[in-house]
Amino acid sequence: MAEKKPLIKEFTKGLIAENPVLRLVLGTCPTLAVSTSVTGAIGMGVAASIVLICSNIVISALRKIIPGKVRIPAYIVIIASFVTIVQMLVKAYAPAIDESLGVYLPLIVVNCIILGRAEAFAGKNSVIASAFDGMGMGVGFTGALLAMALIREFFGTGSIAGIRIIQEAWPIDPMIIFILPPGGFFAFGILIAVANKIAESKGKPKAELHGCESCPMAANCSLIKAPGEDNVKEATVK
Amino acid sequence: MTKAFLSILITAILTENFLLSKFLGICPFLGVSKKLNTATGMSMAVIFVMLLATAVTYPINTLLENNDMEYLQTIVFILVIAALVQLVEIVLRKYIPALYSSLGIYLPLITTNCAVLGVVILNIDKGYGFAESMVNSLGAGLGFLLAMVMFAGVRERLESCDIPKFMQGLPITLVAASLTSISFLGFTGIVENLFK
């Protein structure tokens, strides 16, 4: 069925309509953590996109072989393998990026965008459609990271990708707080508010924090079965 | 010796708080912090899994290093943590149902949480020994608990506030998180001065 849909749609939906960061609110940890500089954001975006596209292709190719009950561990192994490959490549050819991404590079393995797409799309669709879906989601993720990084680096240090925009002689100082952790939360909050406003004007629903429902582990989590606090209370009483 | 451990512990709790300055484990921070009791339950489960994961992955890492297979770290750690969490969940459900209902329900959520894998990898990056790793993991877990409890308090207050329409929902939550995070910036430098 999905094959009938034009492939370009699978690509473009990840850019804006279903942007993984601003609309689906996935992958918040790397978005907040590596968006202090434009170069770091691009490095993370490209690394995660490569993993996403490769794992989407492999998972989709193996979707009829992997038994449903062990699919999550199988997906994790496939994703972890590609993360390891990317890790080695980055360490060998771009040590500066490895330095700036630090622990967040191996942590791509637990990026919920990748496992989320495996569960929601690649496990059910053809190889080519999954590849396009991965590309769209990857570009959407990189774009959102870039938007965050532009805001934070410009306001926080007065430069973009290391090039000074606000000169020393000018009577304005950069606001350091933007490259500190609070600035990350703040910039992300404002970006989501803007994205919500645009979505609202087009009659689309707001980006809500699904919290647990959007988590790829939702299927085997007892907190989710019936969402809401009541369920938690019930589970605790039992 | 005690001084070194205390320094690691306080650094992990206050100055390098996992949620508010390292951004590890943001999903549960935003997702399960609406009510105080779920926030504490989740944090307890995180502390437990962090300690368990550190205890189990430390010998495995030594084994990998002795055989020149450090490149397998990512794959091995995520699999070991996932298997471990599932095992603990099954054991708890079968033998200690009381603990399961208060703690176990959060366990599957933690399997693919970046905070747990993050603490394990950070311990290795920093070259900590076994005892230091355990102290660092405990500190990271306690810091997680502190931030979750504080933020749950903030969010309960937010419920009754009159918020501009475009900021309602997620945006105001993030701005509140930003303000909570500013309070932790105040601890910068505290460890260096306490233990100099």
Image: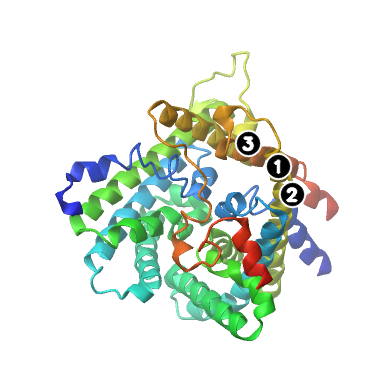
Can you give x and y, in whole percent of width and height, for residue A163 in the image?
46, 27
Callout 1 amino acid: Thr
B132, above or below B159, in the image: below
Residue B175 marker:
3
Q: State the residue position of label 1.
A: B180
Is the residue at mark 1 from the same chain as the one at mark 3?
A: yes
> Quick check: can you spot residue A235?
yes
Precedes in sequence: disc 3 or disc 2: 2
Callout 2 amino acid: Met
> Quick check: can you spot residue A157?
no
Label 3 element class:
helix
Chain where mark 3 sits: B
Label 1 element class:
helix
* Cα distance between the residues tagged 1 and 3: 9 Å
* Cα distance between the residues tagged 3 and 2: 14 Å
Q: State the residue position of label 2.
A: B150
Crowd band around label 1 with a 10 angstrom C-alpha radius: few (<14), some (14–19), many (20+): some
Can you give x and y, in whole percent of width and height, for residue B42 in the image?
64, 62
Q: Left or right of B183: which side holds A139? A: left
